Image: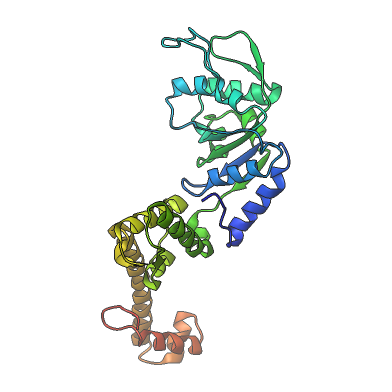
């Protein structure tokens, strides 16, 4: 599952920019919500770069304690700290002649930010506890779901480092803004997870796809992937329906629909009250509402198709 699905214009633009920058050695800042697919875009850039034969090394800056993060990035010498019984190269050395992906860059300590700035500017550093200067040639792709511009304004992130990293910025849109990709991604995940778990090829019912169309996916592509894998595992049927989706997803869609209906009912009530004030005179009611008489008739016709329970026919 390494390919990028980009049917929507928002995602196609992100991919086009990634393709243009891939052939260069420019540092790339990839922004977007958690689970949107930032790491996939980073792998895409590396695979199409001149460094594709080199290593792609990734480190999640948020997953490590801050006191260990610098050691993981730059390595350490024996005796550099308690427990350092042998020397260990860092991720920068591992990414020499390749690409280093720094996920959640905003979690870097102030000291680590200063050292990273030196690596970018001079292409050299020392391991923790070491004196030997190590030269390195690694391309940087940094990922963040934090507004780094705001972090710089709050002085939580170094401005000089930000400008060094922000040579090319690519935004990965959230899944709710790339609806055209949802069905394609779902089909891709269905095929992959059916093969992974030894299940027969499966498909989603029209009703299940309709739920996806109305769901906002707060967890983005990662959440869709997990939903599909769960459905593949728990269902023996060839078709995966609405009941194969978690109740939390179904409840969120029901709530969203209820909110829409409530707005429609409020509008209908307001128009009807205006008609009462106008004593049934539709021309006067239209003037009071600030709409045309034709528009008023269209609204009244639509309200007649809403039953007493608030459900559309």
Which quadrant holds the C terminus? Answer: bottom left
Query: Looking at the image, which residue is at 70% across and 44% down?
Result: 21
Question: Extreme left residue here?
Answer: 309
Query: Looking at the image, which residue is at 35% across and 86% down?
Result: 305
Do we see residue 218 in this rendering? no
Question: Extreme right residue here?
Answer: 24
Q: Is residue 148 left or right of residue 186?
A: right
Spot occupied by residue 132 in the image (x, y as percentages of width and height) = 63, 10
Spot occupied by residue 126 in the image (x, y as percentages of width and height) = 61, 14
Q: Quadrant of residue 282?
A: bottom left
Q: Is residue 199 left or right of residue 146?
A: left
Query: Looking at the image, which residue is at 40% across and 62% down?
Result: 215
Q: Nearer the viewer, residue 130 or 34?
A: 130
Q: Is residue 166 above or below residue 76?
A: below
Q: Nearer the viewer, residue 38 or 228?
A: 228
Q: Quadrant of residue 263?
A: bottom left
Q: Quadrant of residue 201?
A: bottom left
Spot occupied by residue 236 in the image (x, y as percentages of width and height) = 30, 62
Spot occupied by residue 143 in the image (x, y as percentages of width and height) = 55, 39
Q: How is the image coloured?
A: rainbow
């Amino acid at each position: 599952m390494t390919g990028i699905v980009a049917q929507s214009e928002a995602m196609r633009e992100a991919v086009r920019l990634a393709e243009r920058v891939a052939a260069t050695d420019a540092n790339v800042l990839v922004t977007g919500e958690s689970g949107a697919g930032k790491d996939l875009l980073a792998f895409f850039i590396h695979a199409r770069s001149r460094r594709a034969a080199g290593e792609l090394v990734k480190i999640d800056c948020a997953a490590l304690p801050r006191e260990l993060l610098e050691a993981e990035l730059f390595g350490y010498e024996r005796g550099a700290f308690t427990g350092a019984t042998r020397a260990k190269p860092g991720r920068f050395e591992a990414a020499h002649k390749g690409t280093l992906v720094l996920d959640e860059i905003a979690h870097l300590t102030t000291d680590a930010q200063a050292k990273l700035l030196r690596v970018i500017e001079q292409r050299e550093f020392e391991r923790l506890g070491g004196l030997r200067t190590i030269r390195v040639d690694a391309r940087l792709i940094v990922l963040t779901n934090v507004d780094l511009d705001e972090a710089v304004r709050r002085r939580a992130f170094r401005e000089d480092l930000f400008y060094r990293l922000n040579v090319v910025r690519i935004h990965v849109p959230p899944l709710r803004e790339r609806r055209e990709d949802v069905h394609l991604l779902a089909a891709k995940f269905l095929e992959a997870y059916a093969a992974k778990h030894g299940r027969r090829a499966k498909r989603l019912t029209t009703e299940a796809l309709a739920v996806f169309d109305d769901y906002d996916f707060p967890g983005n592509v990662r959440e869709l992937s997990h939903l599909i894998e769960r459905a593949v595992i728990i269902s023996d049927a060839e078709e995966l329906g609405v009941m194969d989706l978690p109740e939390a997803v179904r409840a969120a869609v029901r709530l969203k629909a209820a909110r829409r209906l409530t707005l429609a009912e409020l509008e209908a009530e307001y128009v009807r009250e205006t008609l009462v004030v106008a004593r049934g005179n539709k021309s006067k009611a239209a003037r009071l509402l600030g709409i045309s008489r034709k528009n008023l008739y269209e609204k009244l016709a639509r309200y007649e198709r809403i039953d007493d329970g608030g459900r559309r026919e």
